[in-house]
Amino acid sequence: MNKKLSALHEEQKDLYPSRIHLEPKILNRKDPVLYSEWSTQAPISKEQSDFYERNGYLFIENFFDEDELQHYQTEARNLKEQVSNIQDDRIIREPGGDEVRSVFAVHNSNSVFVNLSKHARIVAITDYLLGSKTYIHQSRINYKPGFTGKEFYWHSDFETWHVEDGMPRMRALSCSFALEDNYHFNGPLMVVPGSHKQFVACIGRTPENHFKDSLRKQEYGVPDPDSLSQMVKKNGIDTPVGKAGSILLFDCNIMHGSNSNITPYPRSNIFMVYNSVENKVVEPYSGQDPRPEYIAARQSI
């Protein structure tokens, strides 16, 4: 077999099989975490770069100034109001209710968030961490209102993106923009530091069109209690919290989730998923039809 065919065979091989076994498995990561070598020209410090590689996330406070923040806050509020009574697949409602939970594909449907997705300082960081040019695999605004905002159960994003979208390798990350102050008590994102270096192969074959339910409440592609307990016992749980205008970058494979919000304080975040142009999605490894374009970009790369 020549080198070109060998490389193609390796590219198509499922290195992270999931939802096919009767028992869960924990596999070691086969990909780098950091795809660039740090230098003084890097857009983040050596300490930040090392922290991201070791822990799988990086929290940067006061990333946006007050004017930028207010611009994004106003647009997010306006968008929620505009879509509140619209029936559209891109608008996800809270489980058991009609309140807007998420709005997807904001990076190509809203001029303000189109510009945000191309923010020069953010793109410089994502290109550095992933070692190449990047594109938006998925974007959304998550609205977690006070008193009624529901939880997002523990999961690795990559597990779903791999199985249901066909993302070959762990060469993607999420950037979460805090539109509200994130406290320890209003349902902030929780991460298991270091968990990005292992992959939990989940059980249970994905039902057809599962995304229609999973975006409201995910039941497949979630870790089993024993695997999760093992990871937390080893690594603990971090809750990177701070003021509105901060950003959180986290590796595609880090285990994360958030509690429901029963406080009066809302928590809204914009999520942009950056994937390497060298890691474009292929056919889903589940063998099923790909999820829609507004969830996983295939045509707009």
Image (tube, grey):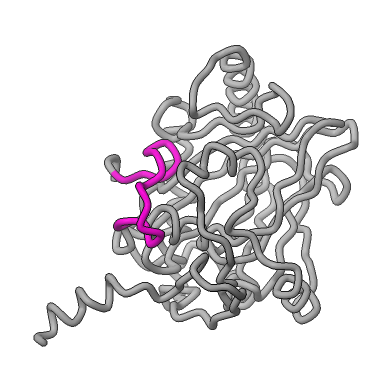
Residue 197: percent from the left, percent from the top?
57, 78
Residue 53: percent from the left, percent from the top?
57, 75
Q: Is residue 286 magenta?
A: yes
Residue at horizontal 30%, vertical 56%? 283
Residue at horizontal 37%, vertical 72%? 14
Residue at horizontal 59%, vertical 44%? 214
> Residue 187's quadrant in the figure?
top right
> Residue 231's quadrant in the figure?
bottom right
Nearest the eye: 145 or 22:
22
Find the residue positioned furthest to the left: 2
Q: Quadrant of the N terminus?
A: bottom left
Q: Is residue 138 magenta?
A: no
Residue 102: percent from the left, percent from the top?
61, 33
Nearest the eye: 168 or 176:
168
**Secondary structure that dominates the magenta span:** loop
Image vertical order of residue 93 relative to residue 119, above or below: above
Left or right of 133? Residue 45 is right
Residue 252: percent from the left, percent from the top?
53, 62
Magenta segment range?
281-298
Find the residue positioned furthest to the front: 22
